[in-house]
Image (tube, grey):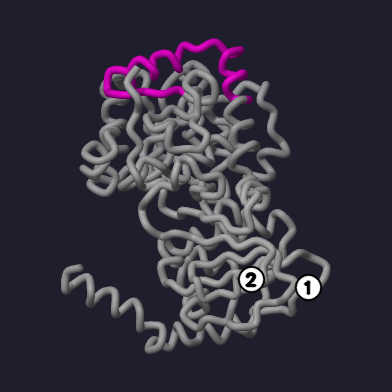
């Protein structure tokens, strides 16, 4: 580790003991805690490392909401540094509006059914099932039944809004949609044109993929609306690619899922420095069939021609786009249903927790950063 990295690590390690905002966060979290309910199974969360705060606390948010969905009461152990960022990390802060309890560090309740932890110091003998997390960027052993990769989920703010549940409840996959193909999201260079994507993951960056699409289809088949009321094309321009970048047209977050549901297909370009992006998961939930270059990064993998369309290079991307703009409606409806079914079976809240609970071992392990490890595509 370089000297700079060591200094940054030490600052992160000790800042909660120094910054008033962090001390205040811990105090407020303790005040917000409720007594442990006796009518629910209990999931105790004991995280010692500040790495659980990575990606603004998304890992924690997803783990908590998975077990909440399954009916578990949530209790955090009273670790100061963990509580000190409850109001600081954006996704972690969302959990303050959820009901939770706090238990003394060395007094895990005897009725604890699930213990989520990153430390061997936890009283693992007191829980019916112990789930340890691994922060390293590695994939779990392929031959182990009790190791799991944390899935990629809908963005916490979108989950919190309830949009996905409302969309699924009102979904009609047989209804025609007003837009053939949509990309919506941030596409600012150089952020979304990182060399790590082609170099490490062998995929086109978001900026590159959009440029290829726009150049290949030409101005007659590509729309770039600047106003929200221009987002939906007129009927005669339905068979086109609509590009709504954040730089041109910011979609209100409360309308995100319903916006994705306007399109038959969603152009699921990669994220910033890795292939996966929450937009892909949200498109599946909205029944907007993803077009992507990295289906193998979901578990199980998406299947080309069934619940997605896959390209492997610039030329195959162009071929896929042309196919999409000329695909019969009945074929689209079948794929739309399959895409949404994939979300319901594998990514809907609670699906991952069910896998962990069903594990036949008292101990299991979740790899939080497995999705960052490149996956080689087998040759055809």
Instruction: Answer above or below: position of 368 versus 27.
Output: above
Q: Quadrant of the N terminus?
A: bottom left
- For image coordinates 67% across by 21% down, the residue present is 174
For label 1, the SS is: loop
State the mark number for residue 125.
Answer: 2
Q: Is residue 252 visible?
A: no
Left-right relation of 285 to 326:
right
Main SS, magenta residues:
helix
Q: Quadrant of residue 70?
A: bottom right
Task: Confirm whether the magenta stretch covers residue 310.
Answer: yes
Q: Which residue is mark 1?
A: 37
Q: Quadrant of residue 202?
A: top left
Instruction: Answer above or below: position of 276 versus 155.
Output: above
- For image coordinates 29% across by 33% down, the residue present is 203
Extent of the magenta region: 309-337
Decide which of 370, 278 is in the foreground and name it.
370
Alpha-carbon distance for marks 1 and 2?
22 Å
Residue 119 percent location from the top left of the image: 49, 71
- For image coordinates 64% across by 49% down, the residue present is 359
Q: Residues within 10 Å of mark 1 (few under 14, many from 20)?
A: some
Instruction: Answer above or below: position of 176 versus 279.
Output: above
Instruction: Answer above or below: position of 109 versus 287.
Output: below
């Amino acid at each position: 580790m370089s000297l700079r990295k060591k200094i940054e690590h030490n600052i992160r390690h000790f800042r909660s003991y120094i910054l008033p905002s962090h001390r205040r966060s811990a105090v407020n979290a303790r005040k917000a805690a409720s007594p442990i309910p006796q009518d629910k199974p209990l999931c105790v969360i004991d995280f010692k490392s500040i790495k659980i705060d990575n990606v603004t606390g998304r890992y924690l948010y997803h783990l908590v909401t998975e077990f909440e969905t399954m009916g578990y009461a949530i209790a955090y152990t009273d670790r100061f540094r963990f509580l000190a960022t409850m109001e600081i990390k954006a996704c972690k802060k969302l959990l303050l509006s959820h009901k939770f309890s706090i238990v003394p560090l060395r007094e895990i309740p005897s009725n604890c059914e699930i213990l989520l932890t990153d430390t061997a110091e936890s009283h693992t003998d007191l829980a019916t099932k112990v789930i340890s997390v691994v922060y390293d960027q590695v994939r779990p052993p392929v031959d182990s039944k009790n190791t799991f990769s944390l899935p990629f989920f809908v963005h916490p703010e979108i989950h919190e809004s309830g949009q996905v549940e409302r969309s699924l409840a009102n979904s009609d996959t047989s209804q025609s949609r007003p837009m053939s193909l949509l990309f919506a999201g941030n596409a600012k260079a150089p952020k979304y044109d990182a060399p790590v994507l082609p170099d490490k993951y062998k995929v086109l960056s978001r900026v590159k993929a959009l440029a290829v699409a726009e150049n290949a289809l030409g101005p007659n088949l590509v729309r770039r609306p600047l106003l929200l009321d221009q987002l939906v094309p007129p009927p005669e321009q339905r068979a086109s690619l609509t590009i709504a970048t954040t730089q041109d047209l910011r979609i209100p977050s409360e309308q995100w899922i319903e916006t994705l549901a306007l399109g038959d297909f969603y152009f699921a370009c990669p994220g910033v420095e890795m292939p996966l992006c929450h937009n892909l998961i949200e498109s599946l939930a909205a029944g907007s069939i993803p077009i992507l270059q990295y289906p193998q990064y979901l578990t199980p993998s998406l299947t080309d021609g069934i619940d997605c369309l896959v390209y492997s290079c610039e030329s195959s991307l162009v071929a896929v786009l042309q196919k999409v703009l000329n695909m019969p409606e009945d074929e689209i409806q079948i794929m739309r249903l399959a895409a949404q079914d994939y979300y319901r079976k594998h990514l809907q809240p609670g699906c991952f927790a069910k896998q962990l609970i069903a594990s036949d071992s008292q101990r299991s392990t979740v790899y939080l950063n497995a999705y960052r490890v490149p996956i080689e595509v087998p040759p055809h």
